[in-house]
């Protein structure tokens, strides 16, 4: 049975071991983070070594490494430490802490949601009442916001009153894009293009010539032309020639970054031969994140 101090030492050791690319960790480094005497850490390490929980590595670059039993002692798997999941307090990154596990304890109760958050590192940096943000996680980019309602120093667990949960699905753009691609022809006039957009309930479409995207026309472009009494122009004189495309296997999270960087609301999705196969809009992404299509189906 491990003591509270031994569990804290193991949490800090595993966290530092992961961040150092699995190099041995000096006892002095652990002592500095825990604000304890290095002699105390050495004595505790001797006990942990005798239990087979840590391994000593001799030499100038030596130190301590956690064994597989160290992860088991903290109810972790070694895989939990492969990715660093950050934790923020008041929008500021908390150093020497990473999140290993999140479990929701009261999700089914309307208007009330709690989570237990398993952290590795110096948990004493966090206090009751602190507003925290956990994430994003490496796969679904899960982010959890809430307030700390409880803290278990021995097991490194926070009880969090959750205010909101956000996640970006781990899907490719092709999985959520509209693949029934509505396109416009370059010799169309404004009236023809407006009818196609209106009839299909969309506010923009790519302009294709010989199966190649040469521009994008939106209802805003058409509205500006009508306001300027330029309704007889061909759409090639109105369309935006600034075209951003993404390959069909690009993940949603990357597509969001591309949209934000270029300040656009839609992307043309192409296959391996650069042929357009769909269009992705911010609305498509929001529906996936909010789960709106499941609520309305």
Image (cartoon, rainbow, N blue to C red):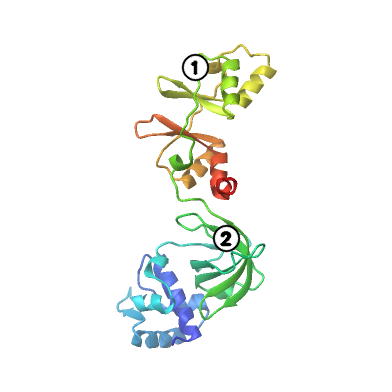
Which residue does the image show at 33% across and 75% down from the upper left? 62
Which residue does the image show at 65% across and 62% down from the upper left? 110
Which residue does the image show at 49% across and 72% down from the upper left? 121
As displayed, is residue 16 above or below residue 280?
Answer: below
Instruction: Give the x, y percent position of residue 240.
Output: 54, 24
In the image, is 142 to the left or to the right of 130?
A: left
Q: Estimate the spatial distance between the alpha carbons at disc 1 and disc 2, rounded to whole Å.
A: 47 Å
As displayed, is residue 274 above or below residue 101?
Answer: above
Please give the label number shown on residue 144.
2
Quick one: 44 or 268, which is closer to the camera?
268
Instruction: Give the x, y percent position of residue 231.
Output: 63, 14
Is residue 64 something one can see in this rendering? no
Which residue does the image show at 59% across and 64% down from the upper left? 107
Along the polypeptide, which appears first: circle 1 or circle 2? Answer: 2
Q: Mark 1 points at which residue?
A: 186
User: Going by the picture, which residue comes out furthest to the front?
Assistant: 297
Disc 2 crowd rating (10 Å Cα; few below 14, some 14-19, many 20+) is: many
Please give the label number shown on residue 277.
none
């Amino acid at each position: 049975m491990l003591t509270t101090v031994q569990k804290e030492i193991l949490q800090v050791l595993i966290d530092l071991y992961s961040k150092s690319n699995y190099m041995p960790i000096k006892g002095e480094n652990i002592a500095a983070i825990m604000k304890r005497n290095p002699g105390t850490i050495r004595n505790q390490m001797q006990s942990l070594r005798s239990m087979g929980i840590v391994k000593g590595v001799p030499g100038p670059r030596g130190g301590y490494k956690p064994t597989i039993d160290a992860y088991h002692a903290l109810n972790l798997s070694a895989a939990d430490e492969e990715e660093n999941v950050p934790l923020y307090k008041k929008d500021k990154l908390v150093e020497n802490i990473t999140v290993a596990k999140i479990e929701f304890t009261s999700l089914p109760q309307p208007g009330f949601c709690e989570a237990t958050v398993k952290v590795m590192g110096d948990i004493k940096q966090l206090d009751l009442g602190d507003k925290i943000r956990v994430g994003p996680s490496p796969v679904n980019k899960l982010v959890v916001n809430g307030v700390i309602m409880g803290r278990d120093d021995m097991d490194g667990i926070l009880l969090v009153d959750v205010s909101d949960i956000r996640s970006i699905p781990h899907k490719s753009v092709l999985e959520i894009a509209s693949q029934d691609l509505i396109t416009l022809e370059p010799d169309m006039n404004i009236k023809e293009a407006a009818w196609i957009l209106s009839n299909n309930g969309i506010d923009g479409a790519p302009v294709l010539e010989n199966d190649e995207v040469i521009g994008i026309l939106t209802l805003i472009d058409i509205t500006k032309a009508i306001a300027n009494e330029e309704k007889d122009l061909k759409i090639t004189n109105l369309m935006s020639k600034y075209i951003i495309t993404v390959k069909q296997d690009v993940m949603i999270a990357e597509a969001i970054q591309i949209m934000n960087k270029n300040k656009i609301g839609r992307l043309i999705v192409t296959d391996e031969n650069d042929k357009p196969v769909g269009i992705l809009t911010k609305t498509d992404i929001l529906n996936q994140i909010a789960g709106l299509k499941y609520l309305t189906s």
